[in-house]
Amino acid sequence: MPDTLPPRTARVIAIANQKGGVGKTTTAINLATALALQHKRVLLVDLDPQGNASTGLGVDRRRRGSGTYAMLLETHDPASLLQQTQIAGLAVISADPDLAGAEVELVPMTRREYRLREALRAVSHFDHIIIDCPPSLSLLTLNGLVAANSVIVPLQCEFFALEGVSQLVQTIDRVRRSLNPALRLEGIVLTMFDRRNNLSDLVAADARSFFGDRVYETMIPRNIRISEAPSHGKPVLIYDKTSAGAVAYTRLAAELLAREQAGVQ
């Protein structure tokens, strides 16, 4: 049965795509950063066992300590797991090393799909909570979708991209019907867009034809600065705020906030 507990005050957005290499974690890191730079209180929850979102925010693996595994499996208070980042207003709950085992350990637990949703009620004072989901349709991803108000799907401008997104949209519909009636598709973000490549234009046109205004006007370009930034433990908006990638994520955050203000559903 769907959860009937009262809604949280924070807007919870899952960044999800079961296909890897689409710019999912990059979008989670830089969207969270861009929102914080707009003076929003933002929490990024690293739900991916690879822990790349934590690394990309400068949280060294050697000093992560307890994180999302402890929150989901050991019921630690999320407030005690928060780590402040180099960006004012942006905190992170890191992916700790044990998170890779959570998939198996969650299986026998009661209300296993709701564990993240229930945990995040303790940190509802944030304006936005961004969840970086794993690149799979797993129990961890399901926890992210059940915890979220909405989903942003990064869509790389490459062949076969729409097939994977269509599968994820079907999953979102199933979660809405059975576990989280409030869940909706926030939007599709076109990533790795290359104006020199006709395929990028074709994929973008197909996506807009299929999803309409759910596709954000802002497109994230292929940009060397976006690729370099994680190795320095920084979002691209901090690594090089004048780069095309940083400008694009700033525009994406502004578009998200404008849709929120306009009450787009």
Image (cartoon, helix red, strand yellow):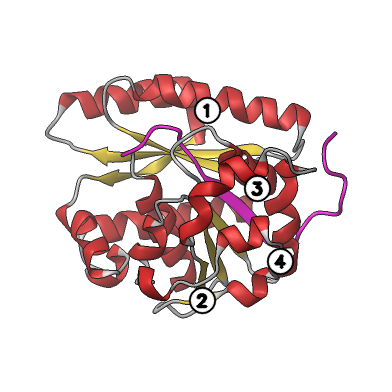
Contact (Cβ within 8 Å) of mark 1 with mark 3: no
Q: Earlier in the sequence, mark 3 or mark 4?
A: 4
> Which residue lies at the image location 57% right of the left edge and 74% below the top edge?
82
Q: Which residue is mark 4?
A: 124
Q: Which residue is mark 1?
A: 168
Dot in front, 1 or 2: 2
Q: Which residues are magenta?
A: 1-21
Q: Earlier in the sequence, mark 3 or mark 2?
A: 2
Dot in front, 2 or 4: 2
> Which residue lies at the image location 77% right of the left edge and 35% below the top edge?
181
Q: Which residue is mark 2?
A: 83
Count neighbours of disc 1 (C-alpha within 10 A) and say few if under 14, some if 14 to 19, many if 20 or more.
Answer: some
23 left or right, relative to 17: left
Which element is circle 4 on? Answer: loop
Alpha carbon distance from label 1 to label 2: 30 Å
Dot in front, 3 or 2: 2
